Each structure stands twice: as structure tokens, then as C-alpha cells.
Amino acid sequence: MRLAAELTWGWQDDPDAPQAAACLHREITHVSGEYTELLANALRTLVPRGRILGLDRLFRRRTGGFKPVRQLIGSLAALPAEDDHADTLVCEIDAFAYGFLKGAKNLDLVLPCSKELNDGFRAVRDDWSRTSKALTEFERTGERLPQSCAVSADQYLALRRIIVRPSARDERRMLATLLVSGPSAQVELSTDLGISNDLSQRTLAPLIAIGVVELRADDRYAIVSSTLPLALFGLRETMGLELLGDLPGGV
Amino acid sequence: MDLVEMFVNRYVIVYLLAVVGIQVVYSIVRNNQRRNISSRRRARGLSDDVMLGHAERLDERRRDALLQSALLLGSVLLLPPLLITLAQTSGNNACLAQDGLAVVFVALFVWLLFTATDVAKAFLGGLAFKTLVAFKSPFQVGDRVSLRGIGGKVVRFDTFFVTLQTPDDGQISIPSGTLWNEVLSSTNAGNRASLCVIRFYVAPFATTAQRQAMEDAIWESMQSSVYYDPHKPMQIFVQQNPDAIQFTAKAYIALTYDEPLFVSDVSRAVLDAASWQGIPLASSPWKRAVESDLQAENPLDSQTGVGAVPGTEEQRGLAHKGTEASSG
């Protein structure tokens, strides 16, 4: 079956929706049988057809965390195209998870990122890029951020005060983990980073206090959507991470 | 009298003042610019440390070095013909001014090349080296380098010295002009990312499944580290050694300074995985020697099972002896 990626940002999807990848995977693995066959049956009953949501929710950046997403995508790609199916199955996936999996697992070979599907993301990415340039000049020369900038100097200075410290290693790791793995429960963050629950709580607290991280209704922590360009810039300059740098030119 | 007039005329004085003056003015302008930027940054609430990767500031430094060299060479080489033309058009004592400038120009060059003081030689050698580095970029400020056998991060690179910060936080200053004939090795060559090589050792009796499990564990541990750069290739090589099966993993770190943290992250994750999955790590020769000594002292131990079952001891206690890391 031909697959196409539609990049999302801000983790606004519902992981319990019937079309959600996490829900689909959970239902299939709870039943005994061959994964690909069960997936084909599940897709037949899926309404509406032709789209899977939140593929990134099946993935965590830790040892053993790659398996579910690999299994689902591998099985989807192996399914034969059926006449009554849409020509291409669109899989929604968070842009940062996609950027990481593209580099680490060559995800784009089975799940290519088409130009047509990603007009929305392209506009957002251009906006982030402009913000990043403005922040670079602000940091380099102290030049004021333009009025059109998506973030304020106060927000930037607040985050900067935390992550610029050489001793703020866990704070930077926390942000990097939240960026790639998406909304996470506290215990997941502690496991991923190999730190105690106490420490993860202490690490999250200042990031929540400055409004860069929020606790969502489902008890998961996530980077606030409007502060994504700040987190991106901060992680690029302090850890060298540039997750969107390798996306195809058109996207 | 003619000789005195030849050297003490306005054209020669203008030439010498211009050569020195251009350098002084350039230095004042640059310092003034830096002070303005610094005070503007402070007014905006930014601390003195600039939170930008060193690659971001590379172009600025390169432009600076090129401009400084161009000003020095340009003033020394271009001013004499200009002044001679000026003297010829004005008509009075043109011949004398021409001779004076030619002699001063040659004298200045000979002095610079052969008989200058150590300070001047160091300045010129350093400036020439700095200019070459700006063009060829064998290394830049912020790079992790090895110069004359000393490894460290380049924290300053001026006309006189290259200053390195060693991993033990020592500051080493190497005269810039003396680096012409040295092998220059840069780990990251102006980039943020750099290659890291980590070696793991598995016991020679590990089964096919255990070897595969080890390879998978290394692969996922590297990619799971937040310091890993996913946009660069990663490789694992397996090699049979007399005492162990060696796994050599090569991956890029997103920020070269984070190499120790990356190695620590990956080692911990791989050792955890080896422990959970019962992958036997190789024991070192000294460990085996200690074990055999202990067994010789207390032969009952071998009957109670400590070290008696192949692989058991390795699985339990040799976590920290199973890894080794180095920069690529």
C-alpha cells in the first residue's frame, strides 16, 4: 500500500480516536493472530478510510521505543493495495518525530513526505525559521525582536536563563525528549532520561513556570505549541539539535 | 643633507603613519563595535556569554581575519605607488620622495622578513597563519583540535597565540606562527557535530542470538541518546579478537562538546540491556588473573559455583570493563 506523510505540530490529535495509530495498534496487539492480517481487517472497518492519525504517539525515543511504529508502518507498507481503498493512505505524524525517524530509520523511504499534503506545515516552518533568525540577531547583537516575531523577548530570556547554565543538563534533555517523543507522562520522562521521579518533577517545574511546558488534561507534559520556536532555537544552540534541518526542500 | 631629506620628507612620513595608523584605527573601530554590541546586549537583559553555536559566529571571525590581513598588506603594498604618483603630480622633489619611499618600502619589507624583533615576527607569522586559516579553515575557535600533541577546545585564536582549553580545564597557549609545520587535527572542523567511536566487548562464547541482541542494543542505545545526531550515518562493526568479540560503534554527536555525556548515556543503556538480556560481556585479563588467584587461595569456591559456570561472572560484575570510547 502506498503511504504518504502529513506533518503535524503541537500534538493536538486525540490518541484515543478510532483512526489514531495508538488505538489501532493497541486493538491489534490485544488480539492473537498475525499482525499484518489483523491490520488489514482493522483498516477495512475504519471510518472514514484513507487516513491514520498520530503515528508519532506509537514512538518513544528510548531502547525498545521504536518497535511499535516500525511494526505498524512496515505492515502498512506490506499490505497490498485494494480496489476499494483510497489510492494512498495518509499518515499524520508530528514533524519532529518524523524528522528524527527520517534520519535514524530512513522512515521517508516507506512514508514519503509529499509537497501537496504539507502546505500548512510549510507555512508554520517558514514562520519558525523567521523567528529563529530574529532570535539569532537578538542574541548576537542585542537587536530588538521585530513586532511580527512569534515570541517575545521576555519569553526568550526566561528560557535562556534556564538552559544557558552549564549545569542545566537535565532541563535541556527534558526539552529534547518532549520535542521528539511528544506529550509524555512523568514516569515516561523519568524512564527515558534515566532519572528519578523527584528529579524529573524538579526539572519540569521551572519549564512549566515560564510557560514553555504545560501539563495537559490527560496528565501528560508537552511543550506549549506557541513556544515551539523558542525550544527549537534553544536546543539548536545549546545541544546542536536541528530536527527539521533534513526535511525535503519542498516541505 | 640629501640623504636626510630623502627619509625625512612628508611622503615617507605619511606612508609610515598610514601603515601604523590603519592598524590602530581598525583596532579602535572593532573594539568600539564590540563595546556597543556588549552594552546593547546587557540593556536587553542578555548575559555576557553569547548563546550561539560556534559555527554561527564562524563567518564573522573569518571576515574579521581577512579584513585585518587585507588592511596590513594593502597599506604596505599599495600606498607607495599612490604616494609616488601624488609626488609626481605635485612636482616638487618628486624624485627624492620616490627614492625615499622605495628605500623605506624595501627596508620595511626586509625588516619584517628577516630582522624584525621576535614580537614583530610572531605578529607577522601569526597574522599570516590566521589569514591562511581563514581561507582554508583547518580549524576555528570553538573546534576540538589536537595541536602539537595537545588536545583541547580552541578558546582563543589571535595573531600571537592559539589558546586551547584541555579536558582537565587547563589553558595551553601555542604561538600561532609556529604552527606552519605542524599537523593540524580537528575533530569537528567548524561543524557542530563530530564523530564518536565507542567500543564494546562481548565474551567470545556469546551465541548468535546474544551477538545480535548486543548489536540491536547498541544501535537503539545510540539512537535513543538525546545527544545523537540523526542526520548523519551510524555504523556498527563486529570483529573477532583473541579475548573478546569487539563491537565498534560509530555515530555522530549533535554537539561535539557533549561527547562524554553521549558516551556515558550509550554505555549505561548498553550495559543495562546486556544485563537484562543476559549478554555475557568480556572480562579483562586482570580480572581473570584475580579470579584464578582467588580460586587458588580458596578451592572450595569453585565447587560453590562462583565463576564455575562459564559466563556467569561476566554477566554479573563486569559492566564497567566492557566499554571503551574514543573520538573519531
Image (spheres, coloured by chain):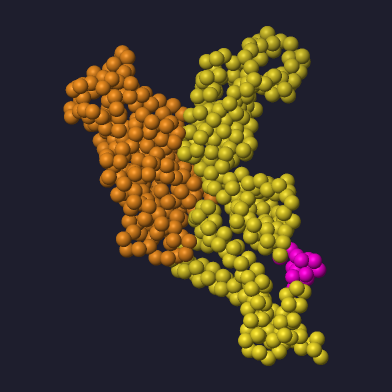
The residue shown at (69%, 12%) is B301
- In the rendered view, does B211 fall on the left or right side of A190? right
- In the rendered view, does B324 fall on the left or right side of A173? right
Q: Tell me which chain appears yellow.
A: B
What count of labels does the image hold? 0
Q: Quadrant of the C terminus of chain A?
A: top left
B76 shown above or below A190: below
Is A230 covered by the magenta stretch? no
The residue shown at (44%, 36%) is A103
Q: In the depicted view, which residue is nearer to us: B168 or A52?
A: A52
- In the rendered view, does A171 fall on the left or right side of B196? left
Query: Dividing the picture into quarters, in which one does residue A105 lie?
Result: top left
Q: Position of residue B223 (x, y in %)?
A: 48, 33
Question: Can see residue B133?
Answer: yes
* Residues in magenta, as a range: B108-123
- In the rendered view, does A19 fall on the left or right side of B312? left
Q: Tell me which chain appears orange.
A: A
Q: Position of residue A159 (x, y in %)?
A: 42, 53
Q: Position of residue A76 (x, y in %)?
A: 31, 24
Dominant secondary structure of the residues highlighted in magenta in the image: helix
Q: Quadrant of the N terminus of chain A?
A: top left
The residue shown at (49%, 46%) is A240
